[in-house]
Image (cartoon, coloured by chain):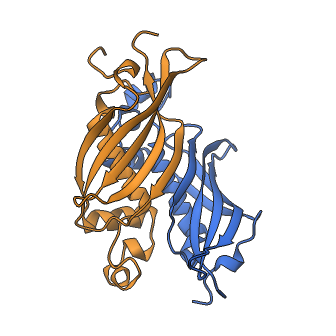
Chain colours: A blue, B orange
Amino acid sequence: MSDLLHFEDFSVGESRDLGTYAVTAEEIKSFAREFDPQFFHLDDDRAKASVLGGLSASGWHTCGIVMRLMVDGYLGRTAGMGSPGLDEVRWLKPVYAGETLLGRMTVLAKRKSKSRPEMGLVTMKWEARSATGETKIDMTGVNLIKVRQP
Amino acid sequence: MSDLLHFEDFSVGESRDLGTYAVTAEEIKSFAREFDPQFFHLDDDRAKASVLGGLSASGWHTCGIVMRLMVDGYLGRTAGMGSPGLDEVRWLKPVYAGETLLGRMTVLAKRKSKSRPEMGLVTMKWEARSATGETKIDMTGVNLIKVRQP
C-alpha cells in the first residue's frame, strides 16, 4: 500500500496533467444508444444540420472520459475511498467526433474528516481541453483519499 | 413540433416519475472497464471484501442511468436544447448489481433566457431510489427547453 498516493501527497494549488483521450464517432453513438439517445449524439446528418453543426458527445460521456483520464492520471495509483459527489459540472463547449481531449486536475482544498481521521477529503477541479486549448468541460468535486498517518 | 413538450409545459413544483432501470453486474463491469476501472466496479471478490460489501456501479454509470431515465421519461419528447451543466451531484449510497432504480424529476425553478427569448432554463432535481425507497443519487441541474411562444 505504501507506494500508493495518500492524502499527504496532494498539495493545495498543485496541478497534474492527466493525459489525452481521442473521441470517436462510434464511441459517441455507442454511449448515446445506452444512456443518452438524443439525435445530437446519434444522427450525423441531423446533428450537422443543428445549431451544434456536427455529431457531439453526450455531456455524460464527456464526464466518463474525464473520469477515465482521472483514473489513468492519478486515481488508479491512489489509496482512494470513493467520492461523495460533485459541486459543479459545466459543459462549456460541445465535444465533437474526432477531437482529442487533454485532462488536467488542480487541488483546490483538502482536510481530514472529523469523524473518520483515516479519511481525507480533497476538493479538486478537473478540466478537459481540446488540442487547440478550448476548455470543453470543467468540474469540481471531492475525492476521498486515505490518510497515511492519521 | 407542437406535440413536443415546451418550456410552458413545465411547472415549478411538479414531479414526474421517470420509470425504472435494472442494473446488472455485467453492465457495471462493462461501464467500469471503459470509464472507471477501479476494483469496486470490476472485481466481485475484492468488492465484497471492501467496505462497500459488494460490486457497485461507478457513480458516473449511475449518472448515465439517470440520464437514460430522463430521456425515456420526458426529455425524448421535449423540445430540448441541451444543458449548460449541473449544480450538484450527490452519490448518497452505492448502487449494487441486481438493484432496480426508480427515477424521479422535480421542477425547482424556470425562467426565459434574457439574451435568447426562444430558450427557457428549467432547473430540475433528479433522483434515483432503490425498490426499498433508499435514495441513491440526487442531482440538480438545468435543462434548456424551447419556448413555444417567445
Closest to the observer, B74 or A36 = B74
Toward which corner of the image does residue A122 lie, by quadrant?
A: bottom right
Q: Could one spot residue A95 in this view of the protein?
A: no
- Say left or right for A25 vs A71: left
The image shows residue B62 at horizontal and vertical percentages of 37, 56
Confirm whether residue B16 shows in the render. Answer: yes
Q: Above or below — where is A138 with respect to A54? A: below
Foreground residue among A9 and A133: A9
Residues A43 and A15: in front is A15
Percent across and percent down for residue B58 are: 41, 64
In the shown orientation, is residue A7 left or right of residue B3?
right
Location of residue A140 in the rendering, given as x and y in whole percent from the top left corner: 61, 54
Above or below residue B76? Residue A113 is: below
Kindly identify the residue that appears in the image at 62 percent across and 87 percent down. Answer: A3
Residue at image x 47%, y 26%? B110
Q: Residue at x 50, y 28 (%)?
A: A52
The quarter holding residue B84 reads top right
